[in-house]
Amino acid sequence: MNTAKELAKRGVHILRAGIWKPRTRPNGFEGKGSVALQWMVKAREASGLPIATEVANAQHVEACLNAGVDVLWIGARTSVSPFAVQEIADALKGTNVPIFVKNPMHADLSLWMGAIERVRSTVEGPVWAIHRGFSQYGQKEYRNAPMWEIAIGLKMAMPEVPIICDPSHIAGNRSLLHPVAQKAMDLGMDGLMLETHPDPQNALSDANQQLTPAAFGDLIESLTIRSASAPKISSADLTALRLQMDSIDEQFIELLHARMDLARQIGLHKWEKGMTILQMERWKEVFDTREKWATRAGLSPEFIQNFLEQVHKESIRVQNEEMTSKISRS
Ligand code: PEP
Ligand code: MN
């Protein structure tokens, strides 16, 4: 109630709260269940804000529709499953409650689009997407890799679907919320979903990423919202910059082509010497040196690492092709 009232003063449009919380392992805080629906209704009365919660099956949908919840969202652990999404879509048939569809846990644009399509095929109301980043193995800077290109891919494939960014689940940590939220605004995202708690450290879930309502207000105030209709550079400048970028990309592709040619030659050599394609030591050395060069050039090592992984995958494919053609000829 405290959070709801405080947020209403700070220009929030919708109040979100998880009632059924899908936890990775049992014994975490799994939410209060249906009893909390009435608490949310009370929070709506006290704050004047529409309320939203996560639904993961048909019973959740039914309970929310009965309680008059204003907005429902499908979580990242649910949007991975076409069966679960279809069950929810069927339970929503003919209603016009706005639905938010979070991106699936793993980086799969089609799966995200598929979930949106299933919901759109049964509900009459608006369907929005939520970009909350993608699960990754191991401890990384972000709790979930943002992979902005996938959100941009959705924008391009479904321009009519507004996208809300969820910096809380991308960052996983208060200190990273601002840059993620700013980036979302710079990319023209249509809104933000942020977790708040009056006493963040003692929150029952995701304590590290919670903000007090006051800190939430400060974060929103500190964002620079650039308007698409007030460009900072004239269109002539923009054209010149784009032409330079085209030329760099062209050179880039030529360099990649030359690199693949070398990979082919190395593949041939490995075949002649009876070596395996994947040479772990060499790969590690490539990785370490490039990471150093990236840091020196002020590029993010994470970006270069992802980029090199793709290049390496293609080199292996090319070398495999080379060896297979040698074997079939010999
Ligand atoms: C949430 O929104 O609190 C949540 C559980 O998020 P996600 O489905 O993105 O993990
Ligand atoms: Mn959460």
Image: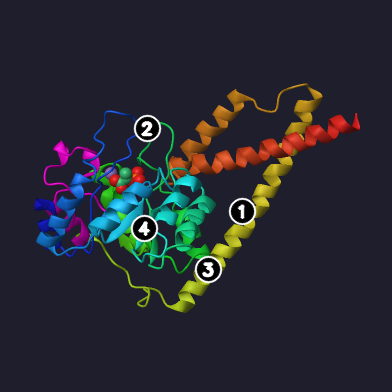
Query: What residue occupies the far right of the structure in this picture?
Result: 330
Quarter-wise, where is residue 266 in the image? top right
Is residue 171 shown to the viewer in this render? no
From the image, tell me which residue sits under label 1.
Answer: 252
Taking the image as shown, residue 114 lies to the left or right of residue 93, namely right
What x and y, as percent, mark residue 326? 85, 32
> Given the image, on which type of amino acid does mark 1 rest?
Phe
From the image, tell me which residue sits under label 2.
Answer: 139
Which range of residues does the magenta coloring cover? 193-221
In this view, the residue in front, 280 or 221, is 221
Q: Is residue 247 above or below residue 36?
A: below
From the image, tell me which residue sits under label 4.
Answer: 100
Q: Residue shown at 12%/54% (left/top)?
A: 214
Between disc 1 and disc 2, the foreground one is 2
Q: Circle 2: is it few (<14), some (14-19), or many (20+) Cα within 10 Å?
A: few
> Given the image, on which type of amino acid does mark 2 rest?
Gln
Q: Are marks 4 and 2 in contact (CB under 8 Å)?
A: no
Secondary element under disc 1, as helix, strand or loop, is: helix
In this view, the residue in front, 274 or 262, is 274
Secondary element under disc 2, as helix, strand or loop, is: loop
Q: Are marks 1 and 3 in contact (CB under 8 Å)?
A: no
From the image, tell me which residue sits under label 3.
Answer: 242
In this view, the residue in front, 160 or 127, is 127
